[in-house]
Image: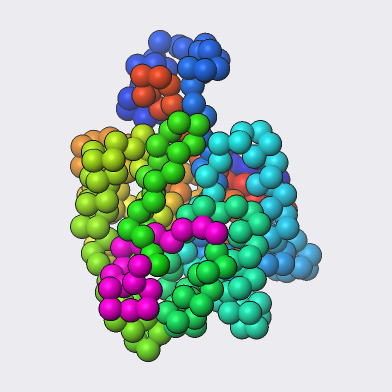
Amino acid sequence: MKRRDFIHQTAASTALLATGISLSGFQKTDVKHITILHTNDVHSYIDPFPADHPRNPNMGGVARRATLINEIRQENPNVLLLDAGDIFQGTPYFNYYGGELEFKLMNMMQYEIVTIGNHDFDNGIEGLLAQMPISKFDFVSNYGFKNTVLDGHVKPYKIVFKDGIKIGVFGLGIELEGLVDKKNCKETVYNDPIESATDMARILKNNEKCDLVICLSHIGFKYKDEPNKVCDILLARKTKDIDLIIGGHTHTFLDKPVIEKNLDGKEVLINQVGCYGINLGRIDFYLTLDKNVIAKGKTITVV
């Protein structure tokens, strides 16, 4: 497994590391270690690519990803497994089974929270709803589903606890007009991602007192030809209280997480791991008793 390593310290931990003190200087009970694993835009790729594939030879595959995830859980049981959307559409598995197989396999890998991408509407909102009872994970999104059959089935955010650390996760969806046929998304309402993220981050950090706030974003990493189009880079710059943005939609292969400054001048991690299950993203957060945070990031190629 190829790894591209990245280590980042938040502003809160600068003084800690400036003194030359490492994590090894603390008692084990002084540091909480949380591992975030994530995928995006898997697009129903269940099998690995063939060995003679010109771009992705012998890469990916659910069985290999599951093995890797299990190995990481043996290393650290405090794992949160997430997906940033476009679970559906891309191979005959989706055409034959309508997402049932994808959800069953994600259950086996113990995904906990996912957001909804534009291709997850490809069988219509009725098709997505039909598969939701299978899932053992939660759906979070800022889409408005009030006047659709999905009303009540998708949450604005989800809070989980890992080793006593309170983690808030919310989701953002891309503008559906021009991407999804109206008959598939029906009366689904697109809500501005910046406004939604501002509200969600405030609620999770200030009201709910979450130690970590994570955004599952399916709005795209950035758009070179449209610099003002809402994307993860602008999202980080125009909001606050988000610790990590896990992205999707643009199939962006990042060699390492990107750092952007938020409205308060604090650093935000952004990561996206391409598509088709080729990579698994890993972000390790180390939180000390006085809330100093160190983050270590890896992109792991699934081979």
Instruction: Using the image as rendered, state which of residue 36 and residue 299 is in the foreground.
Output: 36
Q: Is residue 83 visible?
A: no
Most extreme residue toward the bottom is 183
| Residue 174 within the segment the image draws in magenta | no
Instruction: Using the image as rendered, state which of residue 41 and residue 3 is in the foreground.
Output: 41
Judge left or right: residue 207 versus residue 252: left
The structure residue drawn at horizontal position 28% and vertical position 78%, both measured from the top left corner, is: 147
For residue 198, above or below residue 98: above
**Percent from the top left, x then y, of residue 113?**
47, 55
The structure residue drawn at horizontal position 72% and vertical position 64%, both measured from the top left corner, is: 48
For residue 168, above or below residue 289: below
| Residue 148 within the segment the image draws in magenta | yes
**Percent from the top left, x then y, of residue 111?**
56, 54
Judge left or right: residue 118 versus residue 274: left
Judge left or right: residue 148 versus residue 119: left
The quadrant holding residue 65 is bottom right
What is the total number of numbered labels drawn onto the structure image? 0
The structure residue drawn at horizontal position 31% and vertical position 63%, both measured from the top left corner, is: 142
Majority secondary structure in the magenta region:
loop
Instruction: Using the image as rendered, state which of residue 8 and residue 218 is in the foreground.
Output: 218
For residue 199, above or below residue 121: above
Q: Which residues are magenta?
A: 136-152
Q: Is residue 136 visible?
A: yes
**Percent from the top left, x then y, of residue 133?**
53, 69
The image's colouring method is rainbow
Quadrant of the rendering where the N terminus is positioned: top right
The structure residue drawn at horizontal position 70% and vertical position 61%, both measured from the top left corner, is: 61
The quadrant holding residue 225 is bottom left
